[in-house]
Amino acid sequence: DRTVLLEKEAQTLIDQRQWKNLSEHCSAWKREDERNAAAWSCYGRARHELADYSGAITSLKRAVLLAPQNDDIRGLLKNASLVDMQQKQLRKRIDADQNRQAGSVGG
């Protein structure tokens, strides 16, 4: 079965921590089989590992719609959302610090 082969290849890439290759593999997989929650979850995982949290969230939301009973996918989505929120908060603090520093230098 083709899906089994695609899942096996994805797992090999995960085990080898080849996130860019995983992203490319899963992107092709989800295009080939748009209604496959595993393909969308795979792509979401890859995007998360590549620090593309927005892309991860979008893909994982699609996976949850396709497999709402899957706790693993919901867990990945929750984690990606949390990290995305933390990254945005950190960027706000860094921007605020830079603005304060710029103001004190110019003053």
Image: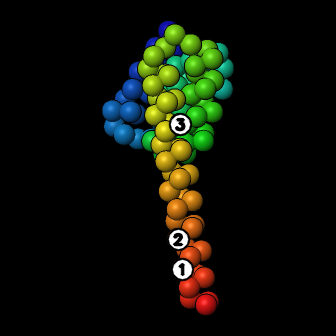
Disc 3 crowd rating (10 Å Cα; few below 14, some 14-19, many 20+) is some
Q: Which mark is residue 81?
A: 3
Q: Dot 1: what SS?
A: helix
**79 in relation to 101, above or below:** above
Question: How are the colours assigned in the image?
Answer: rainbow
Residue 71 visible (yes or no): yes
Inspect the image, locate mark 2, and give the three-letter code of the amino acid beneath it. Asp
Residues at discs 3 and 1 in contact (Cβ within 8 Å): no
Q: Quickly name the residue at label 1.
A: 101
Q: Which amino acid, by three-letter code, is at mark 1?
A: Gln
Instruction: Tell me the quarter of the image containing the C terminus.
Output: bottom right
Query: What separation in Å lies between label 1 and label 2 (alpha carbons)?
Result: 6 Å
Observer-nearest residue: 64 or 87? 87
Marks 3 and 1: which is nearer the front?
1
Q: Earlier in the sequence, mark 3 or mark 1?
A: 3
Label 3 SS: helix
Q: Quadrant of residue 72?
A: top left
Q: Which mark is residue 97?
A: 2
Image point (45%, 25%), residue name: 75
